[in-house]
Structures are given as C-alpha cells and as structure tokens.
Image (cartoon, rainbow, N blue to C red):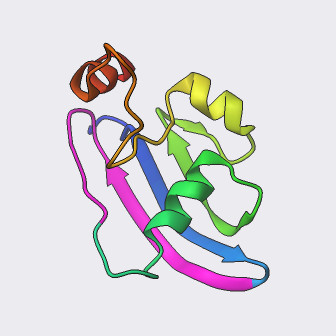
Amino acid sequence: MSATPTLEIRNLHISIDGKPILKGLSLAVNKGEIHALMGPNGSGKSTLANALMGNPKYEVTEGTVFYKGEDVLELSPDERARKGIFLAFQYPTAIPGVSVANFLRNAL
C-alpha cells in the first residue's frame, strides 16, 4: 500500500471571469519530492499557484486538491497558509539577516 501524497490534485479546472484557464490538471507530489512547474507565459502556472492559495479571483469549477490527505479547497487563504501551503517567489524581497535557504528550510 502506498503512502498518501503530500499534495494531490485531481482533474482540476480553474476559470477567471468565466474563462477556462486550466482544464483537467492532475498531479501527485509525494513526501520528499521536488517538482517544478514549467511552461510558456500564459500556460497556467500562476493560475494554479493562485488557486491553490485560495485567491478569490480564481474559481475552481471542478476537481479536488488534497494536502496531507485533507481537502483544502474550502479553506480560507490564511487557513491554507497555517497548514503549510504558501508561495515562495523566484526573486523574493530581501529580508535583512534571513537567507532564502533558511526561509525555505524553516518553512518545511
């Protein structure tokens, strides 16, 4: 029997202002794995990130998102953050005395 994925996305459909952006995305990320979302501009990377964070501009019209076995789509953005779902930017704002490595290490 396999372990429950840390993050599991099933058949996710996301729209903005009624316009479909993502159509049927599925992804499983297991403990200890690192995944990179890559694609051209407009392919839905930021849409996925914003929807996972609970940004109200992004409407999940179908599908499920489980984090550590819990459905997170009904949680508020702050509840998601408290559970460990957050964004770390490619070029983060500098915080004096805090390295990106320490920031990410402490977040995990």
Q: Is residue 33 magenta?
A: yes
Taking the image as shown, residue 53 lies to the left or right of residue 40, namely right
Numbered disc total: 0
- Which image quadrant is residue 18 in? bottom right
Q: Name the quadrant of the N terminus.
A: top left
Q: Name the quadrant of the C terminus.
A: top left
Between 2 and 46, the one nearer to me in the picture: 46
Would you identify the image quadrant in which residue 82 lies? top right
Residue, x 31% and y 63% (percent of image)? 37
Examine the rendered structure and indicate whether residue 75 appears above or below residue 42: above
Depth check: 101 or 39 in front?
101
In the image, farthest residue toward the bottom: 19
Residue 66, x across and y down, in percent:
53, 44
The reply to whether the magenta stretch includes residue 49 is: no
Which residue corresponds to the image point at 26% horizontal and 22% vertical from the top-left?
A: 99
The residue drawn where x is 27% and y is 20% is: 105
- The reply, left or right, for residue 82 in relation to residue 18 is left
Expressed as whole percent of the image width and height from the top left, the position of residue 47 reads 55, 67
Q: Is residue 101 above or below residue 15?
A: above
Q: Position of residue 35 (x, y in %)?
A: 24, 52
The x, y position of residue 24, in whole percent, is 51, 77
Instruction: Judge whether 102 appears above or below 23 on screen.
Output: above
Q: Nearer the viewer, residue 90 or 32?
A: 90
Q: Residue 81 appears in which quarter of the rendering?
A: top right
Where does the magenta region start and end? 19-37
